[in-house]
Image: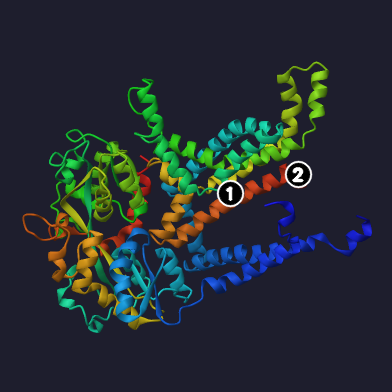
Amino acid sequence: MTQRAHRAFDPSLLLLPAFALLILLFVIPLVWFFVGVLAEEGSVGAVVERFVDVLTAPGIVNALVTTNWISALVTVLTLVIGYPIAYYLANSTGWRFALVLFCIIVPYFTSVIVRTYSWMVLLGRNGAINQTLLSLGIIDAPLQLLYNKMGVLIGMTYVLMPYMVLTLYATMRSIDTNLVRAAYGLGASPLYTFRKVYFPLSLHGVISGALIVFILAIGFFITPALMGGPSDVMIAMLIERAVEITLDWTSAAIMSMALLAMTLVLYVIYYRVTDVRRMMGA
Amino acid sequence: MSEDTKVRLSRRQITAALGTSLIAAPFIITRPTWANVQLPVRTPGGSFDEVKKEHVYEPFRKATGIEIIPVPATVAKLLAMHRSGNMEVDLIDTGDDTLLQLDQAGALLPMDYSAFKLTNPDDLDPIVKRKEQVGNFIYAMVMGYHTAAYPTGKEPKSWAEFWDIKAFPGPRTLPDMASGSPNLEFALVADGVAPTNDKIYPLDIDRAFTSLSRVRPAITKFWDTGALSTQMLADKEVVLASLWSTRLGVAIDKGAPLGAQWNQNMVLVQSYGIPKGSKNIDAALKFIDFSLSPDIQSAWMRAYKAIPVNKKSYPATAPELLDPKTKLPWTQGGFRRDIDWWAANRTKVNAVWQKWVLR
């Protein structure tokens, strides 16, 4: 396309409908909710006081810490498990590629509740995994795989895996394999080649994948609620309880703002670290 | 089909067809049936509506021509509708504690008992008759047990025994704060408080949590939804539970090896309230009157396995819901959850719970 054609039609105009939708359906209701709920407190001083009260309550502080800790662990787990899968995808063709991609994509389109309940069937005290291990004589008593942090980690890692794999895949596809071959040609060992050539080239995929998974994980609600133990309380669970059970919408708004702030900070990092155009491009 | 016989559509034709059908879809799907009056009612959905449709909604439609349209909505959504002045349901069918929350937010109209024609308000259990809401059936929080662990007769017979994790070993579940209210009442009863309303309320929150801590080591998980409570018990994830009698009854009916212990049960009420902004108060009252009348209550409660609010329907109550000694519904021997206490103290309990649960 020539320079003139560019000037005749500014492609950023194409973003206007999406932008309008975002403002209308996301930004306005959100601001409306926050302002409306906080206005009930009366004065600015009272609002500040509520903020301090809510965000320093032991239960909520603990939930914020738990939320970040679980999200970090899930991010590491998805990365460690997802990286080889993405590598396989990026370097295979034909039915193998189709099969692995299918296995990644199908769960992605299944409801989180269904997937979580399936895990409960597998991991339960009398579930498939424990029954198998018991009958093989590997263990004497059922393992507690569910209703504790282990359960939350297994469930969330599984649910968030496609985001990591697909993000890594997009990056790995664009890596020029001639560079790897060149490294071999110059006598580098496979490990050295990976460490010095392939991994650095895939690094921005690693960072984007990790941030996407982390951002999604800190807002998780269903999986920790169903698969976690009594003390595995994540912030989204407390927000839901404040909205639905105690009808304490002020607390809910303040906790949501904290969560939104965390997400935005991470998004800024995401934006700074990754070259968004390169991600979307070839 | 071979290539040459295929009807070849251009991409533009397909796009046009898709676009047209997308735009037309709402008109086809929501074409109103003008012949009938429709009454949108907030309901819990699921099996609740399946049973109620057969035994209440359909007979009501045949009798009056008014069609009940079940609408799912949480209490937060109903409150948001009220605040925005755009109430989308004409009647609310939910727990009495939830209706009280809505009432205290100013969202309900007074209940007009004088409009009842089929139901004599004097026949209704006094605990379900309130100024802004009227109960439509009674159920209870009861003890459920897995019969493989505790054959009927060997199960704990009181909350004190349920709390005794040495004499009655095995994993347990109790309701989470996220279910609406944790079992502080049973915690007090287990600690020696007499199971009557005047002794239990106002709840001694500290004593209740201290008592809960004693049973805590045997709690696998606190349940937040009724579905989870029955699933954990049926899967033998836990062998003892405190859960809703209706959910437990359905599981037993389906053949799950479970039992119900009704001693010291806590009585709960499913209730109707008419929201401010209801567009059809007359039809809503007509429906309430109809569904509380003796014949409808009898048929419906026999199928749903809950306890009628209309005393005239007691003889038709499912036998497993009757105390064999008194021939009265088990709930007559239980204590009633004090929804007024909970409405006033739920936020406080929530704060204590949040701290306690992390220990």
Type of amino acid under label 1: Met
Q: Residue at x 53, y 38 (%)?
A: A157
Q: Nearer the viewer, residue A14 or A228?
A: A14
- As drawn, A39 above or below B141: below
In the shown orientation, is residue B145 left or right of residue A122? Answer: left
Type of amino acid under label 2: Asp
Label 1 Cα neighbours within 10 Å, binned few <14 / some 14-19 / many ≥20: some
The tag earlier along the polypeptide, 1 or 2, is: 1
Residue B167 image point, x, y percent: 17, 34
- Is any atom of residue B128 visible in this view? no
Q: Nearer the viewer, residue A4 or A119?
A: A119
Q: Quadrant of residue A172?
A: top right
Residue furthest out toward the left: B325
> To which residue does mark 2 refer?
A275
Q: Secondary structure at mark 2?
A: loop
> To which residue does mark 1 refer?
A262
Q: Residue at x 23, y 71 (%)?
A: B296
Query: Do the residues under discs 1 and 2 have CB atoms within 8 angstroms?
Result: no
In the shown orientation, is residue B160 left or right of residue A11? Answer: left
